[in-house]
Amino acid sequence: MTDDTEKAPKEEILRRGWTTGACATAATKAALSALVSSRFPDPVSITLPKGQTPSFALDCERLEAEFAEAGIIKDAGDDPDVTHGALILASVRFGPAGSGVRFFAGSGVGMVTRPGLPIPVGEPAINPVPRQLMREVVQELAKEHGFAPDVDITISVRNGEKLAKHTWNPRLGIVGGISILGTTGVVVPFSCSAWIHSIHRGIDVARAEGQGHVAGCTGSTSEKTVRTLYELPEFAMLDMGDFVGGMLKYLRRNPVARVTIGGGFAKLTKLAQGHMDLHSGRSQVDFDWMAAEVASLGAFPELVEEVRQANTALAVLQLCEAAGVAIVPHVANLAQRAAFKILGPSEIALDIVVIARDGTLLTQSEILTYDQLEHAP
């Protein structure tokens, strides 16, 4: 047992919270319920993607002949989230026949003005999972109350434009407010030491079980894809998140036979650049670096300049895919080299798996050891 294991401090258990997407969904359900039944459910419960059914107390409510509005105060738990305490409002009204569910940005919710994001230009910055959760609420209530699921949903955030100045939204071309986010609906409190400590414990468990192959992934989507790809047991999946450096440094001292690093293109681009903490608040994609790498692959000068002027890694990926430039395997190879700079000379075999937002496998690097990489062409 190593000294850092013996002396590891007891970490405080941090309280989880709810995303802006979960709050917007709950507010939508309360408002639409009132519009069709004249009664606001308070508290109002929703079902999240992983099956949790949290309840939310309403902070405000308004019912008129043509629309209803409900508001919920976001509770981010013990996470230092810029939107903790923000009022998330949903206003709903019936739309034209056959229009389906439509989303609108109210005060404090941003609009997408540049490509490269999961939401098209000209749309409110309400991400895909929150949109799906709100559509499911509409379908549920439409079936229950017998109305057509043609509903206009306007999401607003009190002081959202001011809050957005403390986010990356202005740089990403999202103007006028914050984004409505969340893939699971749950905010996991951010504690660097606690998170890295849990990675270490995961490695310890895998070693104790004789598990020779472990995987560290940047999020739940990449974890699901990697686990399925290699048929790994659950305990072989390390909750790496953004802390690739913390994982690799511990593996250097406590090795396994093989480690896979899986993640999205943007996160692994930052690893390829040499960043060992992939959190957006502590590392950023360098588009001058990306332009140079695209140029090294033989891209035309016009594409190189487009990459230099891009605002997201996704935009770069889309540009390169359209031009037939193999940026993804190139980034995977560079990420592998960057990871080995931390692992150093060892017998550990390492590979990189790059995954799209929808879980599609984009590329797999070769499985190499440090020596094999050093002698690779």
Image (spheres, grey):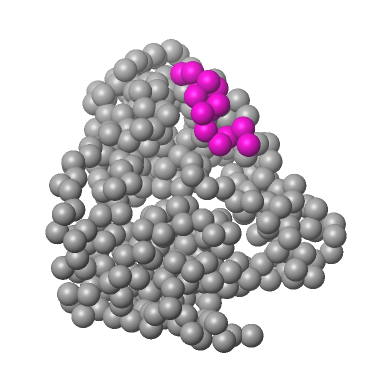
Using the image as rendered, state which of residue 331 and residue 136 is in the foreground: 331
Lateral position of residue 29 relative to residue 332, left or right:
left
The image quarter in which residue 362 lies = bottom right
Residue located at (56% from left, 36% from top)? 168
17 inside magenta stretch: no
Q: Is residue 300 visible?
A: yes
**Position of the N terminus by quadrant:** bottom left
Vertical position of residue 325 compared to residue 83: above or below: below
The image shows residue 202 at horizontal and vertical percentages of: 24, 64
> Exactly how many numbered labels are in the figure?
0
Using the image as rendered, state which of residue 258 and residue 48 is in the foreground: 258
The magenta segment is 158-171
The image quarter in which residue 337 lies = bottom right
The furthest residue to the right: 301
The image shows residue 107 at horizontal and vertical percentages of: 54, 20
Residue located at (60% from left, 25% from top)? 176
Lateral position of residue 352 relative to residue 78, left or right:
right
The furthest residue to the front: 3
**Position of the C terminus by quadrant:** bottom right
